[in-house]
Amino acid sequence: MTKFSSKKPVQAGWIVAIIGAICTFTYAWPRFLVNAFGLDSPWTSYLYMYGFGFVTFAIGIALILRKGSCQFGRGSDTFWFKVLIFGFVFFASLHGIWIILSLTIPYKGA
Amino acid sequence: MNNFGIELSGEATTVVAIVAIAYTIVITAFGGYFARFNRNINDFFYSGNRFAWWLPAASMVATGIGSYSYLKYSEQGFNTGMSSSTTYLNDWFILPFFIFGWLPIIYFARIKSIPEYFEKRFNRTARYISLVIILAYMFFYIGYNLYTICVALEGMFGVPQIYSAPLMALFLGAYVTFGGQTAVIFTDLFQGIMLYVAGAIAIGAGLIAVGGFGEWWSWLPIAHRLPFVHLTNDPKFNTAGLFWGEALAGSIAFTFMNQGFIMRYLTIKSVNDGRKAAFFNVMCTLPLSAVIVGAVGWIGKSIIMKQSAVGGALAGYNLMEIGDTFHTFIVICWETVHQNAWIFGFVIAALMAALMSTIDTLINACAAIGIYDLYRPLIKPNASDAHYLKAARWASIISTVIGLMLVIFFNTQKGSLMSIHYKGIMIIIPAVVTTIFMGAFWRRFTATAACVSMIVGSVFTVITVAYPEMIDPLSSFVMGPHNTKYIYMRALFGMLVTAVIGFGVTLVTKPKTREEIAGLTIDTLDESMAIYKGGKPNHAKGEKIRRLTVEIDKALKTDDIGLSTDIMKRLKAHDGDMIYMEDSRWWLGGLRSNHVKAVTVGSLSDNMVKMSTQTFNHAYFLKNHPVTLEKIF
């Protein structure tokens, strides 16, 4: 007989709270960015992409840890978990540095 | 006639045509060679799940770059700059869901096609609803790729599409039909190299023309240097839409439901190697591909800016003019290689390579769905392997013909290639993508909810084409663009409608028990691994044992191998553990290999492995070649 892990299911109240938090963030985040940086700033686009991207990524990480599909110490799970975190930081840094270089190196035209 | 902005002389046309045709024939012959590695349909479609990660990963390079990619992304790069790379660099957000969720689910459950997952996870109705949507997605890509290369061939050589489309389909159909997945992987590996070399030539020639890397960057307008385009300005290309429509819906569709990509992952020897392939693809292949397909557009923009500043052509080159931005790639290549027909012919052959390498994957994938989801379950359930292998070849031919017929449909469409592409994809994918996601990550999600939400979600998405104002409130909520096009926001709308309906229906319907869906959701993977192995998984990491000599022992059961106690210790393996054995020549990438079970033979020497003749033959081993062992779990 197959044994199943006995993690408690998430309570309905928590699900509603999480969905509410995501909706609030989805509404507030772009407005905050536009107020802080302006609609035309390259940082607005960057933070829009990585703000929502981070939420998506974080939900994925939370899910794989909570549901047990990633277990530290089992096989290569720990390694792959570190790779995931590294990759996110790598791409976020790459795009950030790219914007800085774009804005700081002079343009010969105009 | 649309001549792609260049004038090819009669001699140049002949040279370019010779290079392109010769290339196509060589690839067809190369692919046909691999027919000998197909004994059954598992070999034909999944190459026996035996390849090392780097082989399918490297071949994904070519699959991910379609014939439209060079033309479309160079145009986008010319118009909006380096933000054309966004679609290639935004896949990391969904990677946790893939490498720890979807990949192990489909691998361990031995899923052969995505619709098959729908039947196991939900019911048969869900299977056939998803089948219709997924086939629409796949055929759309086949037809679109064929159409774009035919447009290019007609533009440059004046070959009418009525001739070029069947001819291209004939070559493609030939090697996919006989060679199957193994042919697809090996030809795509070769074509991937070809694509990169051709891309490097085009980029190198462009950089030399503009005066080097520093000059290129300095003449590139600041807005064109940025990695992300304006949040909302351009209705067809904006960061808000790109996140919701492309980074989420598009990436999930490409990674989770593109049967062609899924089949690549299923050819790999283990989930761990599948993760390596996924990591390599997102971290290396996609960024490189973004440069390869878009850089000619970025360089073209710098050249045009520099020309206007110096008041004429750059020294040693003709004046380059981009009348129609769709011609950017062809014009810039042709001029920057000094109108050298041989080099240009090589670049055009790369366009053919891009076409062939994308469509061969899709044809093979459609054929897999045709066999596993239609022919075997509905028409001929209990036939022999030889029969299914024959049927698989017919399915490849039928898939090619359907793709060919879709060229007629694309011919009647109006608008740019980019808009035709995304308009179609963003209508097709939202409902099925959301259903896959909810099915894999939410155990409570019910079969009724899956069926209802896929149908209603798809219908609502289609309705927004006629009534785009339905998307207004949602686009306002996420601060997306305000217009009547909503190419990407349509996908978000479709996903949201599907999710809400799926959630609502789930709450009022009865879910399957955990036992019924063991191994098909993210929280049941432990059971899945046990079922896959046929015993308790052993996760202890052992050594890889190289260069063992094979000794035939007829007493051993097929697919069992005998190992000494010392080797078992080094592998950290127990009797019955799953072992992957391969020819020690690493560069074969697992072409000669198999999964077997370990059995301890105490008296055996430490540099030997015993197996039966059948086991030896199943792995396609050759006499006098040593083998390497690795414990899977």
Image (cartoon, coloured by chain):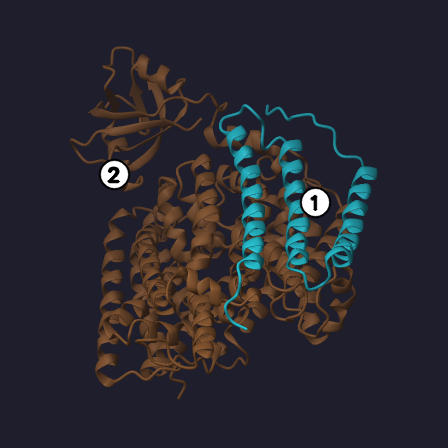
Q: How many marks on residues? A: 2
Identity, as a three-letter code, of the amino acid under mark 2: Tyr
Q: Nearer the viewer, residue B433 or A79?
A: A79
Q: Residue furthest left?
A: B624
Estimate how packed mark 1 is, as few (under 14), some (14 to 19) or many (20 or more) residues with alpha carbons within 10 Å.
many
**Helix, strand or loop under label 1:** loop
Q: Residue furthest right?
A: A13
Chain painted brown:
B
- Relative horizontal placement of residue B543, taking residue B474 as reference (left or right): left
Residue A1 picture location, percent across and down: 59, 23
Residue B622 picture location, percent across and down: 19, 36
Q: Residue furthest top?
A: B603
The residue that disc 1 covers is B445
* Residue at horizontal 46 percent and vertical 29 percent from the top: B533
State the quadrant of the N terminus of chain B. Answer: bottom left
Residue B582 picture location, percent across and down: 29, 33
Identity, as a three-letter code, of the amino acid under mark 1: Phe
Tell whether label 1 touches label 2 (CB within 8 Å).
Answer: no
Residue B205's place in the image compared with B111, above or below, is below
Label placed on residue B620: 2
